[in-house]
Amino acid sequence: MDNNGLKKVAVFGSTGSVGRQALDIIRAFPDKFQAAGLAAGNNLKLLKEQINEFRPGMYHSSSRIDYTSKFLPLEEIACSPEIDLIIMAIPGSVGLAPTIAAIRSGKTIALASKEILVMAGEHVFKEALQQQVQILPLDSEHSAIWQCLSGEKSKPEKIFLTASGGPFYNYSHTRLKKVTAEQALCHPTWKMGKKITIDSATLMNKGVETIEAHWFFSLPLESIKILIHPQSIIHSLVEFVDGSMKAQLSATDMRLPIQYALSYPERIANSELPRLDLENMSPLTFKAVNYSKFPCLKLALDAARMGDTYPAVLCAADEIAVELFLSGQIAFTEIAILIEKALEKHTCTKQPSLEEILQADSWARSYVRTQGEAL
Amino acid sequence: MDNNGLKKVAVFGSTGSVGRQALDIIRAFPDKFQAAGLAAGNNLKLLKEQINEFRPGMYHSSSRIDYTSKFLPLEEIACSPEIDLIIMAIPGSVGLAPTIAAIRSGKTIALASKEILVMAGEHVFKEALQQQVQILPLDSEHSAIWQCLSGEKSKPEKIFLTASGGPFYNYSHTRLKKVTAEQALCHPTWKMGKKITIDSATLMNKGVETIEAHWFFSLPLESIKILIHPQSIIHSLVEFVDGSMKAQLSATDMRLPIQYALSYPERIANSELPRLDLENMSPLTFKAVNYSKFPCLKLALDAARMGDTYPAVLCAADEIAVELFLSGQIAFTEIAILIEKALEKHTCTKQPSLEEILQADSWARSYVRTQGEAL
């Protein structure tokens, strides 16, 4: 942070859903935040527009490698002294190495990329502890828990990650088999990117969030519960040893948790953010999750319990399986089947290095692609 | 607190509902809390039992004035160096002078007696600020807000005090007129003392809690909203400038907020305290409050806005009016009528001293008693 209190932010994944919303917040508070670095994938058109608007000192696109003085590799932006905080919102395993590099140069990380903690949570938090670096959650559920734990002296006894249940929560197995990509992309309460919308429909998302919560809040997996809450108003809850619970509530708008991570430990007034109208709201309901109908959730929890390279295989297998489903090559219910096969077939490496984790990721991608094409 | 970390507690109002529950907590944690002082009203039988069990060094009953070396006036217990924290749960205006005395001797106050802040919130918090003394809420609503504000750097934009609505929320005015004391004493969700149960049925309770919240959290009255929440699961909510809200949830058991105030800033595991079962709970609903049907609430907010000696008159008038209703002398709907008359008839003293506040209290009591007998 410079002398004027301006936080210099690098947005990694700036053309994606989280990245664009992060830029909305940065745009709204030019005296507080500056987009000092931008990194995108293949959407060069939007990246150019963002560069024209925000005039960052550094940028990156995965589709170009002819670096210049401003067009830089990801790791270089991650380590630049011009950056205070990194919004890490690159999907997949690509963000892992730059995240580790950024932690080693003492940057605060606001983490949206789920794969990073699932694959390498132990590495990430070990480095963060050594460097005294903060890893802040951007996800609505983890932000909710983080907000509820603010000021508490001791760990919670349990946390409850809420799940809308996605568009198919009440579907039979037969009906689930016939679900199309178009149907799966209609999430009942949240507008998000394609991959995460499908992960919400399979409930893989909640499995992955359980693993993230395990690392973010250093809680045993058994203390992390999933609760179906179709209204998506309560974004998660915590339960303390005395039986008291706290919940965080808000409209379903990702800009709120993004702004909270950017402004933390302060909160800033933002009239653009929607408000809840408590007096005119649907009743808030909760129900137990049906594990048998949503095998991806169970697979994620199994992979988490097995640990080592299994969670990396889970993530990579899911990424390819979702891709195959979106392109119409496999059925919705085959996503779980392919992930299960990959987990079964995988030869685990104990206490893996980052390189071994990336090898497991790579193996699972090619395995699932081959298997998927054979289906 | 002594060298062993034992908190020495004086329970003022030890034979009442809050006092007995405070002793339940103290009994459960003999290594953490000690009932070093007890003070009761007229229930000498129960007070003797409590003295035999807890062996406090000091005690008091309002029905005896033949003091001994252990049987002491309230103020003396309040100021004793043998006391760290005072549970102030004496109903009415009697607790005001000992509370001020305790603050002046640097004791932490856990406050249940609603009248103290309503009558003299400005005096109490001025003294507390000067003496750097903490005034902790015991009420479930204020405890909920206090828990939700933990760790937050800035004040909330709004707070929402939840109200079950009491047993008559859906009654017509005609039906309300005929309500008996017996019916009014059946609260749908909480077991409490008689006076507060009637105040819940008239919603006077929420008016009084609004005034308390105004002082506890130094918020303008306009920022404090009331929300009908028939399930009494969410005990209150706060809304921040960014639109994020936090809520505290728990079973309806006063021992939880009492234990929280005693153990603060820690929380302690207590298997005696009931837990919420989120998966098997009624849907949580909220609705706007109907001010016209519950005039006591409006009278309380009016008295709060007028300030000075009006809130003291409100409290005293309500105490006597509820007494007259419980003894069958007036109708349920006449409680509000008597309070309104007292507020209209009162000659206000600007910036009153504690003595002038107590004079207003005294005037209102005798005025309402006379008016009530004339009805």
Image: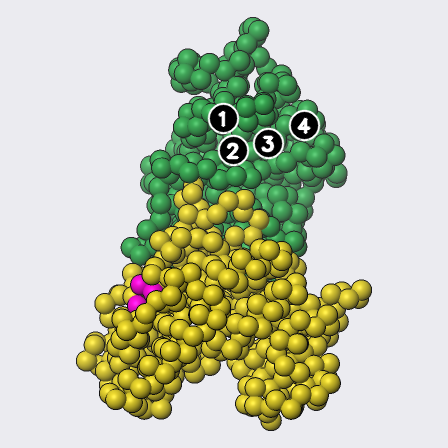
Chain colours: A yellow, B green
Residues rendered magenta in the picture:
A299-303
Q: What residue type is labelled 2?
A: Leu
Q: Residue furthest right?
A: A3
The answer to which of A83 and B181 lies nearer the viewer is A83
Q: How far apart are marks 3 and 4 (CA)?
A: 9 Å
Residue B33 numbered tag: 1
Asked if disc 4 and disc 1 are in contact, CB closer than 8 Å, the reply is no
| Relative image position of residue A294 (x, y in whole percent) | 28, 71
Q: Which chain carries label 4?
A: B
| Relative image position of residue A354 (x, y in whole percent) | 49, 68
Q: What residue type is labelled 1?
A: Phe
Q: Mark 2 lies on which chain?
A: B
Q: Name the residue under label 4.
A: B106
Dot 3, crowdedness within 10 Å: few (<14), some or many (≥20)? many
Secondary structure, mark 1, is strand
Circles 1 and 3 on the same subunit: yes
**Which image quadrant for residue A311?**
bottom left
| Relative image position of residue A360 (x, y in whole percent) | 40, 73
| Relative image position of residue B371 (x, y in whole percent) | 53, 34
